[in-house]
Image: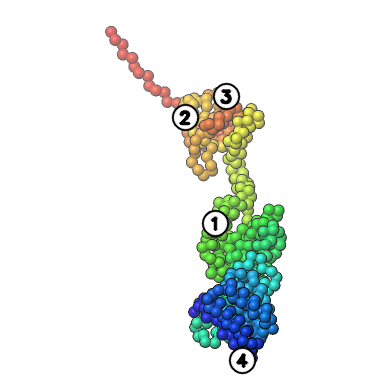
Amino acid sequence: MTVAVLLLAFGLAGVCETKKNYKDRAEFDLYSAVSKDFESKDYKKAISDLDVWNEKYPESDFKDDRQVLYVHAYAGLNEQAKALDAGSGLLVKDPASVFRAEGDRIRLLYALVTAVEHVASPSAEQAATANEAARQLEAMSKPPAGMSDADWRKAEKGLKAAARSAQLYLALNPVAKALQARDCKAAEADALKAQGQFPESVQAAWYLGSAQLCLSRTDPSKASPALYEFARAAALDPVKGMVDPKWQQATVVPYLEKAYTQYHGADPEGLNQLKQLAVNSPLPAEGFTLKSAAQVAEAKQADLESKHPEYALWLKIKSALTASDGEQYFATGMKGAAIPRLEGVLAGAKPACNPKELLVAIPKPGSAAGNAEIALELDKPLHGKPELNTPLSWEGVASGFDKEPFRLTMQTEAGKISGLKTSSCSVAPRTRRISRR
């Protein structure tokens, strides 16, 4: 038996008790009118008839029963804030004095906990009413009269899930308000409270991440914990986390991937490791940090400069030359300047024998040589034929630059080139002339 089936049995029989009496026939007729309104689901007329009943018989023996009917009538009209207001005084009373049967009490509690999630900004009293209804609903452990244990177990799960959902909504509502008001500090404080109460909640992690992302605009140290919480929201079990799995996959997961990439750079393995870490604890370990994309780039540059300083130097030169103002940079800051030693691979020679110009490629360490991007103009021709695809290093002075296709020209001396290998130039045999007589 589901919660919906359990609630279908709602009726007005509970108004009739031996300890309570109608003041007169007119009061009974008013009750009968309300009863008919509910049977026809005319909740608007039910409210009108309840108002007449309340006005004419304010101290009726059935005023608590009447108040319960107000709750259900407002809920039927989807006026959930008024339903909560109508039920505020009922929960502090002895249930035995208000309800004929435990099933009637369950229906009221369920109506109140489901009502609050439809109220955008519950008042303090409305929140207290919903929280108390949730507390009482969660405390129930026995089936109401007439329901089997098996049916109760089925219904109990849905009832208590509704109670927890209402409590979570109330815990997160202040966070949502603070974020809307851009009060990032208050949002984080309220989100931490909510997560402490609901550590397995996807939404609690999501809201905490949102609050910390808000703070990161003025406090960059909050960026890492924000990404941790988004990763947790993406990795938690949606059933235990009380969210729709489709929402988690369609909203949380892609948002995390975008935010992580923007902050840290593309790193699928690192992102997967972050999710595995975050799912194990509501909060990151003290001192937890993720490197920003700039920090990752700096670390890679430092490593490159340490292991391959010549290649790192070339990347800086090439980056400056390929920028939008590269030609101006060359003309004003590089032309005629001595360039420290670089390393590359000989890709060509002009001419092939006794060349006056060498073409050099500078491949990424560990990679094959690509296009020649540097032309070395020699002070005098080399003797012999240089061996191509051999590594070499040199020093020189920048003398020319072409952006399309990219080519940096440098002037150097043969004595400043290391690693260059040459072989003797082969001389083509002369053709013997045959004299004719």
The x and y percentages for residue 265 are: 58, 51
- Label 2 close to label 1 by CB (< 8 Å): no
The x and y percentages for residue 50 are: 62, 77
Q: Residues within 10 Å of mark 4 (few under 14, many from 20)?
A: few
Q: Amino acid at mark 4?
A: Thr
Between the residue at mark 1 and the residue at mark 4, the CA separation in whole angstroms equals 62 Å
Q: Nearer the viewer, residue 176 or 124?
A: 124
Earlier-in-chain disc, 3 versus 4: 4
The label number, if any, that marks residue 254 in the structure image:
1
When the figure is inspected, residue 347 is found, relative to residue 266, above or below; the finding is: above
Between the residue at mark 3 and the residue at mark 2, the CA separation in whole angstroms equals 20 Å
Earlier-in-chain disc, 3 versus 2: 3
Earlier-in-chain disc, 1 versus 4: 4
Q: Residues within 10 Å of mark 3 (few under 14, many from 20)?
A: few
Between the residue at mark 2 and the residue at mark 1, the CA separation in whole angstroms equals 60 Å
Label 4 SS: loop
Q: Quadrant of residue 433?
A: top left
The label number, if any, that marks residue 18 in the structure image:
4
Earlier-in-chain disc, 4 versus 2: 4
- Label 1 close to label 3 by CB (< 8 Å): no
Q: Nearer the viewer, residue 173 or 48?
A: 48
Q: Which residue is mark 2?
A: 423
The label number, if any, that marks residue 379 in the structure image:
3
Q: Residue drawn at (55%, 29%), measured in percent from left and top?
A: 402
Quadrant of the image for the C terminus? Answer: top left
- Label 4 close to label 2 by CB (< 8 Å): no
Q: Residue drawn at (35%, 18%), measured in percent from left and top?
A: 431
Q: Of discs 3 and 4, which sits in the foreground?
A: 4
Whether residue 166 is visible here, answered yes or no, is no
